[in-house]
Image (cartoon, rainbow, N blue to C red):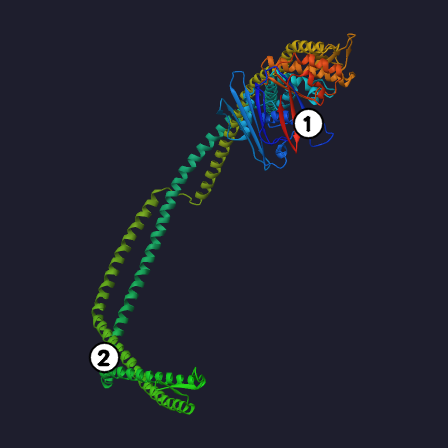
Amino acid sequence: MILQKVSIDSFGVFGQDVEMDFERYSNDTKILIIGENNDAAGADSNGAGKTTLLNAISWGIFGRTPTDNTGSSVVHRGMGKCTVSLQLVDSEDREIIIKRSRKTEGGHTLQWFINKEPQTKRTMVATQKNLLNYFGILESNTEYYNDFLNTTYFSIEAVKAFAGKRSTSRDRMDLIGRFLNLELLDKCTSKAKVYSNNVKSKINTVEGQIEFLQNKLTAEADVQRLKSEINDAKVQIKTYQQETKELKKQVEVLAKIKDLQEQLVDLTLMKERTATDLETIISIYANQQKGFEEKLSKRDEIKQNIENQEQILISKNVHDLPANINKLEQELSSCTNKNVVIEQKVLIIENQLENHLECPDCQSQLMFQDDELTSFNKTSLSKKSKDLKNKQTIFIKEHNKIKKELDDLYDDEKENRRLEYEIKTGYKELAELNEIPEKIKLLKEEKKEKKTATLKYLKGLEKKKIKLELKIKKYPPEDLELYDDIISTIEVNEGALENLKDTIARNQTRIEAFDKDVKDLDKLKEQEDGLLAQFADYQFWVEGFPSIRRWMIESFLPSFEEQTNSYLNKMEVGMRVRFDTLTEKKSKKGEFKEEFDLSIIDEQNKKRALETYSGGETKRIGVCVGFALRELTLNKGYSNFSFLLMDEVIDSLDETGIGEFFNLLDNITGLKLLITHNSDLKSRFSNVVRIAKTDGKSTIHQT
């Protein structure tokens, strides 16, 4: 992946519209980056923005920087947004554009393109995963950024990552494994362990089930005894069934006799009840006839009463009553209306007496008289009010008199209606009395028919009774008191039969369960054998995949060791490294444990631990190891970035070390960007980039 251009807008110390064009350089060019801080006297190049340039490249690709500047801290102070755009070319000569932006208020966006075709996904996280996948970084690789720092973005800390005193054997082994894309083997090992543990869990479960069934079968009752109990129960069932069958026949005969006797008792009771009912009905008919005759004897009395009431009505002259009532109602209404008119006039006069009208011009008191406005005269108004009240008193007396006369007419009208109703009721009673002789005749006929029908019904009951008595005599004499005892015996026998059947079913279930447990035990043992075979297979791979991983690393180590020693030789340091992945265990001779051993062979060909070397020597070793790892992984296609970023990796070296470093740097492929505080190194570079900071903003100057 060749870097062509970096565009920066308000990222870190940089201002707006800052660009660095790499297309002017060849792919193996060495570029020195120096700084100039014009804002702080004596600061030299510190704070100018040299490291920020490399951080911009890192942030554009990964959204991260070595110092983990996240969130809005990457935005230039006072600005609301920063943007970094990278233009690269891949191995297939396709143009790659990556554009990343960050707002101070939390908005983070990422876009990237292949030959101007957008590759952006729905979310920023998905877009980042897609971009990493394009760079060949597996999703399972959580250390991808540290790997980038170890092979592409070199700093003091990155140099120490592999050859540092704090770097562990596990760190080195994992680093090599990631660069060789051996995560798949790690996954396979984890999967094999999971499968092995799952199978082991299943084996434990099956072994527990086997032990449970074996204990259960050992404690189970004797099957032969259960079968013997079943046979005995079947014999007892036959005995009970035969006895019950005979008892049911006997009960059937007794039930028929009992039923006939109950029918005979019912017929006798029915006959007695029918005779009693006949006597009751005859008595009812006699009482009804007597009542009709008593009503008939009052006919003359009712006629006389009607005549008397009719004479009273004639004497009251009822025909003139409605007209008289209507006349008095009209007079009462007229009197009431007159009284209301007078009362309204009185109210108007009294209102004028209490509330005088005034002339708006002269403020003199006024009043209405005969619908005309005139001067207020209290005496005149008071006299008129008194006259009206006297007149009102006369009307009230007249009203009360008419009201009393009208109430008397209302009472007469009510009494007349009562007399008319009683006369009407009397005529209705006379009409009903005229029908009584015919009703008495019909009643006598109905009584005769009822008596005849009842006597006939009694004869029929007597015949049925005789037939039942004859049927009873056909059966041999039986003691009906035995009926309940036999029924009880049958119920006891049936209960015993059910218990015996339950015993048979229970024993059969136990026998079937025993047989099933035996079969289940055989199946579990077969399952156990299969699981043990699976467990052995998985255990083989639990150990096999790490061995394959170690073998692949071991196959890589000779070229890694050779390349590292080649770089050490070019630096003329007089030492070489040795890599090994197996160390003999202290506790057991002849056995080895997996461990990445880094040994240093000095000029006297003696093996020394890394910790015994000085800081400068350790840094030389770290640089050679890092460069060798980068070159090998780049050649094998494990790394996609054909540019190298170096941040102050030589600033602590002496003049000899710097010379050795530059001898080595000529053998490193790809575009190389080196940051240093040592401006004297400009003579060693044909391409120098100066980053100058003025008024709080940095710019890039290419020569």
Q: Which residue is mark 2?
A: 303
Say few, some or many: other residues with alpha carbon within 10 Å of mark 1 (under 14 / 14 to 19 / 20 or more).
Answer: many
- Write down the quadrant of residue 421 in the picture: bottom left
The quadrant in which the C terminus is found is top right
- Write down the quadrant of residue 450 in the picture: bottom left
Residue 121 locus on image (x, y percent):
51, 28
The foreground one among 486 and 226 is 226
Residue shown at 32%/63% (left/top)?
280
**292 with respect to 670 (left or right):** left
Where disc 1 sits, the SS reads strand
**578 with respect to 60 (left or right):** right
Where disc 2 sits, the SS reads helix
Q: Is residue 377 above or below residue 510?
A: below
The foreground one among 25 and 347 is 25
Residue 603 locus on image (x, y percent):
77, 8
- Write down the quadrant of residue 252 in the picture: top left
**118 with respect to 454 (left or right):** right
Residue shown at 34%/57% (left/top)?
272
Q: Disc 1 vs disc 2: which is toward the camera?
A: 1
Residue shown at 60%/36% (left/top)?
79
Q: Which circle's residue, 1 or 2, is located before the other in the chain?
A: 1
Give the residue furthest to the top. 605
Q: CA distance from mark 1 to mark 2?
A: 148 Å
Confirm whether residue 551 shows in the render. yes
Q: Are marks 1 and 2 in contact (CB under 8 Å)?
A: no
Say few, some or many: other residues with alpha carbon within 10 Å of mark 2 (under 14 / 14 to 19 / 20 or more).
Answer: some
Please, what is the three-letter code of the amino acid marked with disc 2?
Answer: Lys
Q: Which residue is mark 1?
A: 36
